[in-house]
Structure formats: structure tokens, C-alpha cells
């Protein structure tokens, strides 16, 4: 298990270093968003190669499908413009790049390694085997993947509508029930991976903080809360927020 953890940590350090160099050269911190999904795929691959049981490759597939789709989706958006993401622009306004290294790149690297612990532990446990939790985790993972991918697709379709004819705020489909279906889906994916990995390894309580940390990042650190600061300035968004759940899908409220 220690060998998997160390190898995964070295892989994360290498990825964070390369990403920071690319961001510095391009003058945009937002490239770190592409590395986020790819980083989990890298860790899952390293864990599968160094690990010792068949379950590790099943977990790699789960992570690779999610992380590959996310990196492709984010990469198309990031590479379509030369502008910095408003979230990072606000966070780093007037600050040196060294601040971004510690505030963004190192923080993301630590979070990436910690959140992926259920995958690492399961891969490094010699006695890991299939269990009921493994399959329940796969179902939770699939639910999250549907929310994330469908939500992203619906938002992309909304953005492609002519500016003068589309509504000011996206509030149809999954976005009618939650203001952030993609972030909610992300959280479900990692709760599912935790269940699958912990169910296989038996390390249930020992790794439960990993999906908790992921949920914290999605809600408060670099996800929904940070994005909402910008979105609340858009016409119609405060009214949309008043009737729509921020995270968990719920029926819209009636606002008088």
C-alpha cells in the first residue's frame, strides 16, 4: 500500500510542476482545470500498475471515464479563448505568480492526492475483492456521471444560442432543479468511487474524508461558491437563485 501511495504522490508532484510551468509560460492559471481531471486518471493508472489485485483496474476504468471526459470538456472551453477564467482572475488580481503556485497549484495537487486515496488504498490492498459496496459505488458513480455530462451538454447548448434570443439564465433541464448539476455530479462520482474502493479494500472509515474534501472543494473552495460571486452580477441570476437549489437537485421554490 505504501508503494502505491508514494508512487501516486510522485506522479502528482510531476503533474503539478509541469502544469505550473505551462501556466506560467501561457500567462493563464486556468490550465490547471484541465490537469485536474487528468491528474486523477494519472494517479489511478499509477495505482493500477503498482497495485496487486484485479479490483484496481475496475477503479481505473471508473476514474478514467470520468477524468477523461472532464478534461476533454474543460479543455475545449479553455483552449477556445485566451482569457483568464474570472474565478482565478478575481482570486489572483494584482498578486505575483508565486501566489498562484501555493494558492492554486500546490493546493490542488494535495487535494488531488488526498481525494484519490480510496483508489490508492484499494489498489494497494492485497486482500481487496468485489463486494456489494463496490457495485453500489458504481451505481452512485454512474448517477454522478449522468448529472455532470448531461448538465455540461445542456449548458453548452444554451451558450450556442443567439445572444439576443436566449434567456438571460440557463434554467431548463437539470438546471431547473440545481444551479450546479455538474458540481453535484462530480461529488456523486467521488462518493461512488469511495464506496467502490472502500468496499473492496475494507478501509471504509479510514478513507471517508477523501470524498468529504472533494465535496468541500466543489461547494466552497474553487467550485460553486466562487462561481456564484460572478454569476450573481448577471441579470436574472439572483431571481433564479432564489427559486433553485444551489447544489442538491430539488423542485423549484415558488417565489412570490
Image (cartoon, rainbow, N blue to C red):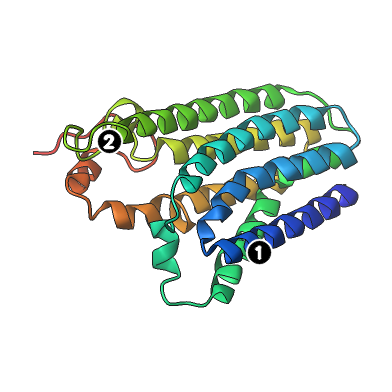
Compared with 89, 143 (above or below) is: above
Residue at x 55%, y 50% (from the top left corner): 33
**What x and y, as percent, mark residue 123?**
83, 38
Considering depth in this image, is 135 or 58 the residue closer to the camera? 58
**What x and y, as percent, mark residue 218?**
49, 49
Give residue 124's mark. Answer: none
Considering depth in this image, is 9 or 115 the residue closer to the camera? 9
Considering depth in this image, is 174 or 75 the residue closer to the camera? 75
Q: Say which element carries label 2.
A: loop
Left or right of 44? Residue 214 is left
The residue to which callout 1 is attached is 21
Residue at x 84%, y 55% (from the top left corner): 6
Quadrant for residue 89, please give it.
bottom left
Q: Residues within 10 Å of mark 1 (few under 14, many from 20)?
A: few
Residue at x 52%, y 30% (from the top left corner): 144
Compared with 88, 213 (above or below) is: above
**What x and y, as percent, mark residue 184?**
46, 38
Q: Earlier in the sequence, mark 1 or mark 2?
A: 1
Quadrant for residue 142, please give it.
top right
Which residue occupies the extreme left position in the image?
256
How far apart are the two marked residues, 1 and 2, measured between alpha carbons? 35 Å
Compared with 209, 178 (above or below) is: above
Which image quarter is the C terminus in? top left
The residue to which callout 2 is attached is 170
* Residue 191 visible in rendering: no
**What x and y, as percent, mark residue 114?**
68, 53
User: Which circle, 1 or 2, is nearer the viewer?
Assistant: 1
Residue at x 32%, y 58% (from the top left corner): 229
Amino acid at each position: 500500500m505504501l508503494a502505491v501511495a508514494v508512487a501516486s504522490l510522485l506522479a502528482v508532484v510531476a503533474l503539478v510542476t509541469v502544469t505550473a510551468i505551462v501556466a506560467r509560460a501561457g500567462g493563464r492559471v486556468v490550465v490547471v482545470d484541465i490537469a485536474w481531471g487528468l491528474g486523477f486518471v494519472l494517479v489511478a493508472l499509477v495505482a493500477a500498475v503498482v497495485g496487486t489485485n484485479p479490483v484496481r483496474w475496475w477503479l481505473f476504468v471508473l476514474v478514467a471515464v470520468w477524468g477523461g471526459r472532464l478534461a476533454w470538456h474543460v479543455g475545449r472551453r479553455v483552449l477556445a479563448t485566451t482569457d483568464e477564467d474570472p474565478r482565478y482572475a478575481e482570486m489572483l488580481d494584482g498578486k505575483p505568480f508565486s501566489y498562484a503556485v501555493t494558492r492554486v497549484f500546490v493546493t490542488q495537487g494535495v487535494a488531488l492526492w488526498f481525494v484519490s486515496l480510496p483508489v490508492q488504498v484499494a489498489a494497494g490492498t492485497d486482500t481487496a475483492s468485489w463486494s456489494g459496496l463496490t457495485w453500489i459505488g458504481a451505481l452512485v458513480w454512474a448517477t454522478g456521471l449522468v448529472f455532470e455530462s448531461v448538465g455540461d451538454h445542456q449548458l453548452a447548448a444554451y451558450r450556442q444560442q443567439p445572444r439576443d434570443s436566449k434567456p438571460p439564465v440557463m434554467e431548463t433541464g437539470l438546471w431547473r432543479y440545481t444551479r450546479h448539476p455538474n458540481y453535484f455530479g462530480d461529488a456523486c462520482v467521488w462518493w461512488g468511487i469511495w464506496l467502490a474502493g472502500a468496499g473492496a479494500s475494507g478501509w471504509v472509515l479510514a478513507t471517508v474524508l477523501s470524498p468529504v474534501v472533494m465535496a468541500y472543494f466543489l461547494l466552497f473552495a474553487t467550485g460553486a461558491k466562487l462561481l456564484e460571486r460572478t454569476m450573481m452580477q448577471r441579470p436574472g441570476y439572483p431571481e433564479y437563485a432564489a427559486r433553485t437549489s444551489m447544489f442538491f437537485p430539488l423542485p423549484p421554490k415558488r417565489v412570490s
